[in-house]
Image: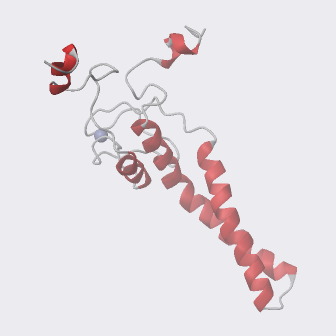
Amino acid sequence: MTGRPDAAVSKTSPVRYGGQDDAERPLGRSIKRGLLNRCPHCGEGRLFRAFLKPVDACAFCGEDMHHQRADDLPPYLVIFIIGHVTVGGYMMTDLVWNISMWAHLAIWVPITVLLAFGTIQPIKGGVIGLQWALRMHGFGGHDEDTDPGRGGPIE
Ligand SMILES: [Zn+2]
């Protein structure tokens, strides 16, 4: 007889930690559903009830969405992405055409505003999908306000 006495244990199912809520949450699928204004859990219910206000819970599957704390990340990502598009576009067109700074402002400021308004909601949805997939801020089924790992109850 060779091998460790507990070798039979490895033939059974692997040990899962983290409670009952162990359904798979693929990161890419969750972010994509959020980008498309869909619930990251079911992909059917709408994620936003107003321009930047997420629903409290999915109307289709009932998944709680009030846990989301997208906070400053969506505007940061919008500034990062749109900044590269518009500043890069300005620098490239400035090399090709000899137009005044006022003409550049008349072109790039409206483009910046339109792109920012057009991308902030999908990016916020993607951030909420990311938080849901990573079980952040209560999406994992625990109450963050009473998590002892974060210092206990918060008044
Ligand atoms: Zn849903």
Please say if 2 is above or below 32.
above
Residue situated furthest bottom in the rendering: 97
Q: Nearer the viewer, residue 133 or 44?
A: 133
Residue situated furthest front in the rendering: 1
- Tell me where residue 109 appears, x and y as whole percent: 73, 69
Measuring 25% from the left and 40% from the top, which residue is drawn there?
Answer: 60
Please say if 128 is above or below 7.
below
Determine whether, in the image, residue 1 is placed left or right of residue 118: left
Determine whether, in the image, residue 52 is placed left or right of residue 40: right
Measuring 35% from the left and 50% from the top, which residue is drawn there?
Answer: 29
- Tell me where residue 64 appears, x and y as whole percent: 37, 30
Q: How many marks?
A: 0
Question: By what rule are the colours in the image chosen?
Answer: secondary structure
Quarter occupied by the N terminus: top left
Q: Nearer the viewer, residue 42 or 114?
A: 42
Please say if 138 is above or below 51.
above
Quarter occupied by the C terminus: top right
Kindly indicate the quadrant of the structure image that contains residue 104.
Answer: bottom right
- Tell me where residue 37 appears, x and y as whole percent: 40, 51
Determine whether, in the image, residue 38 is placed left or right of residue 9: right
Determine whether, in the image, residue 25 is placed left or right of residue 111: left
Kindly indicate the quadrant of the structure image that contains residue 24.
Answer: top left
Residue situated furthest left in the rendering: 1
Measuring 40% from the left and 39% from the top, which residue is drawn there?
Answer: 133
- Tell me where residue 59 appears, x and y as whole percent: 29, 38
Quarter of the rendered structure image containing ligand 1: top left
